[in-house]
């Protein structure tokens, strides 16, 4: 088993253990992204948010173990909440259109079906962001959400594409 390198969709190099097989950090993110996709189907908002937070914290714990970084649950919660807050603030700009669209009965019924993709995309983005942070020598204590905001937004787009592809393949 020889380590190889290839480019992902964004042009970044990723290491693979064998031809086409991602290394462990990517496998961790993929596994928890799948769990988040499932958590997105929970119909009660508060339960869905709690499940999503639990999935993401467990993923961060596994990634920190892989990189030998001390895990801090409280710091992890703070970081994830700040990251979600940054995308929520951007989403509010589109809020009026969303409110109007949700008044259309058929779309209102279909809106909850977008939550699994959103949950998976956010989890993917959080995981990939922390892989990047840990590989550059970072820890939970020196994570700066403000400087990570642009990369997080980019990874969120990548995560949406991946989650939609996954949903279309298996739905």
Image (spheres, rainbow, N blue to C red):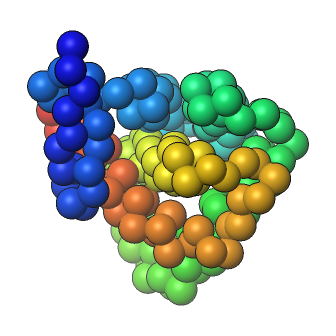
Residue 54 at least partly seen: yes
Query: Which quadrant would the C terminus be assigned to in this image?
Result: top left
Is residue 55 shown above or below 154?
A: above
Residue 154 screen position, x and y as percent: 39, 67
Residue 164 at least partly seen: no
**Residue most toward the right?**
74
Q: How many marks?
A: 0
Residue 111 screen position, x and y as percent: 41, 54
Is residue 83 shown above or below 138?
A: below
Query: Which quadrant would the N terminus be assigned to in this image?
Result: top left
> What residue is shown at x 77% (from left), y 59% (from top)?
142
> What residue is shown at x 83% (from left), y 38% (from top)?
72
> What residue is shown at x 50% (from left), y 64% (from top)?
152
Which quadrant of the figure has residue 79? bottom right
In the shown orientation, is residue 38 left or right of residue 163?
right
- Of residues 75 and 23, the one drawn nearer to the viewer in this rendering: 23
- Of residues 32 and 37, the one drawn nearer to the viewer in this rendering: 32
> What residue is shown at x 59% (from left), y 68% (from top)?
148
- Of residues 63 and 31, the one drawn nearer to the viewer in this rendering: 63
- Of residues 21 and 39, the one drawn nearer to the viewer in this rendering: 21
**Residue most toward the top?**
1
């Amino acid at each position: 088993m020889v380590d190889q390198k290839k480019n992902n969709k964004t042009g970044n190099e990723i290491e693979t253990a064998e031809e086409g097989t991602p290394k462990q950090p990517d496998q961790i993110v993929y596994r928890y992204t799948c769990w988040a996709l499932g958590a997105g189907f929970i119909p009660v908002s508060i339960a869905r948010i709690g499940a999503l937070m639990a999935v993401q914290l467990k993923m961060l714990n596994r990634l920190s173990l892989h990189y030998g970084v001390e895990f801090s649950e409280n710091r992890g919660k703070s970081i994830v909440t700040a990251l979600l807050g940054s995308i929520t603030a951007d989403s509010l700009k589109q809020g009026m259109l969303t409110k109007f669209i949700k008044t259309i009965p058929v779309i209102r019924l279909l809106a909850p079906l977008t939550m699994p993709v959103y949950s998976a995309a956010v989890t993917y983005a959080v995981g990939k962001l922390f892989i990047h942070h840990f590989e550059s020598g970072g820890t939970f204590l020196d994570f700066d959400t403000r400087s990570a905001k642009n990369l997080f937004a980019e990874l969120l787009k990548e995560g949406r594409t991946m989650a939609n592809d996954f949903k279309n393949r298996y739905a």
